[in-house]
């Protein structure tokens, strides 16, 4: 009877040990998966917020750079209008056409940049001569600029493009005799921003995958004891 009781006492202990052995990998895997899931969610959400904030900031940076270029062109025009006519060595005086002709001949617009001149409310010349629809002589924007008597800096949003412009009236004898306009289409810059954003997104996804893999192994090392 004593031998039988010992056998009965040892059997439950062997059964419990077997159950613990099977449960340990499951518990370990579940804890590891939960850690990785939370880590992935936090990393993905923070990355998404950062990416959503970066794209508008890039567009703002592009517009600031373009506006700086517009101001530079205006300052160059002001200096020329107050200077001497290189053809005569004398001040331009009331010769509005000479001011515009000299400026357009000496300044080459940047990519997507356009220089326009108007005399007494009428379109005169432009550089380059080929203009997009939003800046042609019959466009709403040009008609608006022809009526200005004060400097104006603004933005014209079109269905497929955006125009940033800066208008500077040419005053002679206290009267507005002409209008100088420098305009810039932002399509090219916006395409560059979108390409840069896609590159950043691809690099972020690759980094996110690598970080998740490393987090999986790191969680395993932490939970191993």
Image (tube, rainbow, N blue to C red):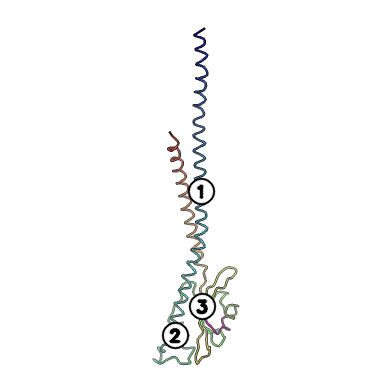
| Disc 2 target residue | 102
> Which residue: 52% across, 19% down?
12
Q: Main secondary structure of the magenta part?
A: loop
Give the mark nearer the N terminus: 1 vs 3: 1
Mark 3 lies on a secondary structure that is strand
Determine whether 208 is above or below 131 in the image: above
Q: Position of residue 55 (x, y in %)?
A: 51, 61
Q: Position of residue 85 (x, y in %)?
A: 42, 89
Question: Foreground residue, 6 or 112?
Answer: 6
> Which residue: 45% across, 43% down?
215
Determine whether 219 is above or below 202 in the image: above
Question: Foreground residue, 122 or 12?
Answer: 12
Determine whether 174 is above or below 136 in the image: below
Mark 1 lies on a secondary structure that is helix
Asked if marks 2 and 3 touch (Cβ < 8 Å), the reply is: no
| Disc 1 target residue | 42
Question: Foreground residue, 218 or 209?
Answer: 218
Q: CA distance from mark 2 to mark 3?
A: 19 Å
- Most extreme residue toward the top is 1
| Disc 3 target residue | 166
Label 1 Cα crowd, 10 Å radius (few <14 / some 14-19 / many 20+): few
Quadrant location, the C terminus: top left
Determine whether 51 is above or below 225 in the image: below
Residues in magenta, as a range? 145-151
Q: Nearer the viewer, mark 1 or mark 2?
A: 1
Q: CA distance from mark 1 to mark 2?
A: 60 Å
Q: Position of residue 95 (x, y in %)?
A: 48, 91
Give the mark nearer the N terminus: 2 vs 3: 2
Q: CA distance from mark 1 to mark 3?
A: 45 Å
Label 2 Cα crowd, 10 Å radius (few <14 / some 14-19 / many 20+): some
């Amino acid at each position: 009877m004593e031998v039988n009781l010992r056998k009965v006492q040892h059997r439950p202990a062997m059964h419990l040990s077997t159950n613990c052995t099977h449960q340990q990998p499951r518990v370990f895997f579940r804890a590891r998966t939960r850690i990785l899931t939370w880590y992935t969610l936090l990393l993905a959400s923070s990355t998404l917020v950062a990416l959503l904030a970066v794209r508008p900031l890039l567009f703002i940076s592009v517009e600031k750079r373009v506006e700086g270029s517009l101001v530079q062109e205006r300052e160059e025009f002001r200096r020329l209008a107050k200077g001497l006519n290189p053809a005569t060595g004398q001040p331009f005086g009331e010769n509005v056409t000479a001011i515009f002709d000299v400026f357009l001949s000496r300044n080459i617009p940047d990519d997507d940049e356009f220089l326009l001149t108007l005399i007494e409310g009428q379109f005169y010349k432009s550089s380059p001569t080929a203009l997009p629809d939003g800046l042609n002589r019959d466009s709403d924007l040009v008609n608006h600029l022809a009526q200005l008597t004060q400097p104006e800096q603004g933005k014209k949003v079109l269905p497929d493009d955006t125009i940033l412009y800066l208008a500077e009236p040419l005053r002679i004898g206290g009267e507005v005799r002409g209008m100088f306009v420098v305009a810039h289409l932002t399509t090219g810059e916006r395409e560059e921003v979108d390409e840069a954003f896609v590159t950043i997104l691809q690099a972020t996804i690759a980094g996110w995958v690598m970080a998740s893999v490393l987090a999986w192994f790191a969680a395993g090392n932490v939970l191993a004891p």
